[in-house]
Amino acid sequence: MIDQEDVAALLGTEGPFARELPNFAPRAAQQAMARAVQHAIIERETLVAEAGTGTGKTFAYLVPALLSGERVIVSTGTKALQDQLYFRDLPRVRSVLDARLKMALLKGRSNYLCLYRLDQTVREGATFDRTQASQLAAVRAWSARTRRGDRMELAEVPEESPLWPRVTSTPENCLGVECPFYDDCHVVKARREAQEADLVVVNHHLLFADLALKQEGFGEILPGAQAFILDEAHQIPELAGQFFSQSISARQLTELAQDSLNECNGVTGAIGLLLEPIEALQDSVRKLRLTMEGLPERGPFHLLEASDTINAALHDTREVLAALTDVLVSQAERSRGFANAHERAAHLSERLDRIAERNSERDVRWFELFPRGFALHATPLDLAAPLRAMREQTQAAWIHTSATLSVAGSFDHFARQLGLEDPQTLHVDSPFDYAKQAVCYLPEGLPDPAVRDYTDRVIESVLPVLHASNGRAFLLFTSHRALRRAADLLRERVPWPLFVQGTAPRHRLLEEFRASGHGVLLGAASFWEGVDVAGEALSVVVIDKLPFAAPDDPVLQARLEALEHAGINPFMGWQVPSAVIALKQGAGRLIRDVHDRGVLVLCDPRLTTKGYGRLFLNSLPPMPRTRALADVQAFFAETPSPVD
């Protein structure tokens, strides 16, 4: 073990990173964070560290993690960030430190090729269209040469291809040790490597799925660790809600029915017993979805209970699921597939009964509707208690880091959501010179965001900015309706390539936007974070409204009511802080590099007309603000946009 000053020195001017890595810039903020992370690991403390964009937070936590001599789990927000960390950042740090440690990358099972399901799909000889037949051939060829079986390796089969669910497994349909391909299973190999590693890179979905399972006593996928480092930690409150919820979906029920039917093919006489209850379940799920027609996309459970028709359909679904479970018992010993189907049916039946019947004050029961399906949920009202219990059970250091965790310098909102009591906190500023690199433009004359033609007025205000910047812009919207309206307005009015969320996969839109040089990209929720476009291709970020959470979210409504009962102003105590953190994420798309220059356009007039507007503005990087279009035009005139 080395002392704390040495950790900072390693990242300093005379350290090995400055000597060995091209373009490495020593940063005092990075060194301060590295010290704080090392101290948290040694003392098994909880640390909340906000590190502004460009701080170099990845190296700031990897260096002390690799030098700690402890087993560490690093969790990131997305699979793409996982890959970047494991294949790019970790090898660099490991090489400079000459750290001889075992490292592993672990993703959820749906990311790995399932050899059994691939074999089944090939044997079934299903009728595929030309595209899927070509993709299946590509998967078969890749399966013979891949070592990891990670589907990210196979770029020629798109992530959204409907072939992937047919050649990957789920916890429900995995045959486990009885699978004929068990010895070569990519999931088993990846988990084995993780259990033997000193440092494991996971994503938040997998981490919380595993920790939630451990809470229920089902064992663990991930090895026990002495330190957990959560990057992009601002995502944790929402994700934790998913993993501490009880949920059941139409898709789970129809997949159970289909898998049970498929299993009949190899078992004599099974179809005679199972066909009727399988078809009854499929039919009842369809009928239940039809009875929900006309309801909002999401809503509180009492809307379902208020309808006799829906209640009757829900009761029927519970009855036929229980009947199918009973019949599957008689077949469970005849094949591993039937044993698996029976376990799933029993689990889903129990969960459906629990959600339909339980009306606990600690849970919010609600539903979601999809074009062809539905999901029913029971979500804990307060996540702080289960999260606190989970951390205490690990007896490990917990390090939470992101560029967006504070509201006007305070970490109280983030800490309250996660049940963190008096954590160590650290804020380190970005090294970027926002005073010179950026301008925040607040257009004058815009109406209240609730007026019908608000998006039209926003586009009118933004067009002169786009002409000044020669395109090169992100327009971020708080709703898909506003995004579609803006796209319609801009198509006939701008000379630059237009890229609209929903017209192509996100990664392709971003690649084409970067390549265009002068593009204008319109995005909603998923483009507000995790998008990195450094350089002149992106010089304007426009945000149409303050990103308050949808008021029709039943979980949010229940939480706000609970805060009010506790004597806390729900608007200032929850809605505003959450929106501030979301706004910081969106604004963070603008300046990604010391050489970037750009204008942040915040259209919502509430920033200057409402008292809480100051909280939003005071939480943004320290860039000059203006209400004059001429200042924006002058900013771009200083550095002409690149010519084609």
Image (cartoon, rainbow, N blue to C red):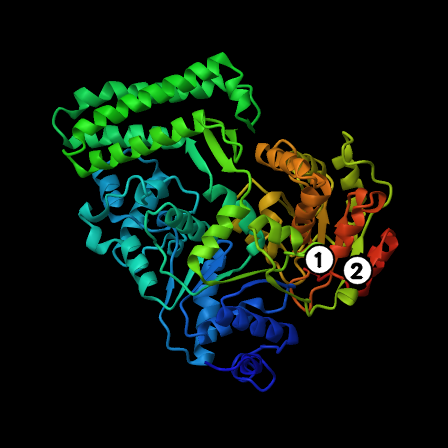
Residue 203: name its quadrant: bottom left
Residue 373 in view: no
Left or right: 311 with respect to 220?
A: right
- The residue lying furthest to the front in this view is 566
Labelled pair 1, 2 in contact (Cβ < 8 Å): yes
14 is higher (above) or lower (below) than 323: below
Amino acid type assigned to the residue bearing label 1 in the image: Ser
Quadrant the C terminus occupies: bottom right
* SS at mark 2 in the image: helix
Q: Residue 54: image x %, image y %?
A: 63, 67
Q: Residue at x 29, y 60 (%)?
A: 192
Residue 630: name its quadrant: bottom right
Circle number at residue 144: none
Q: Residue at x 50, y 73 (%)?
A: 64
Viewer-nearest residue: 268 or 575: 575
Q: What residue did someone put label 1 on?
A: 539
Whole-number angstrom distance, CA of label 1 to CA of label 2: 9 Å
Could you tell me how many numbered marks the image carries?
Answer: 2
Q: Residue 622: image x %, image y %?
A: 77, 62
Q: Residue at x 78, y 43 (%)?
A: 604
Q: What residue did someone put label 2 on?
A: 636
Q: Earlier in the sequence, mark 1 or mark 2?
A: 1
Left or right: 121 with respect to 215?
A: left
Viewer-nearest residue: 475 or 353: 353
Left or right: 96 with respect to 342?
A: right
Q: Residue 627: image x %, image y %?
A: 86, 51
- The residue lying furthest to the left in this view is 268
437 is higher (above) or lower (below) than 471: below
Amino acid type assigned to the residue bearing label 2 in the image: Phe
Residue 302 in view: yes
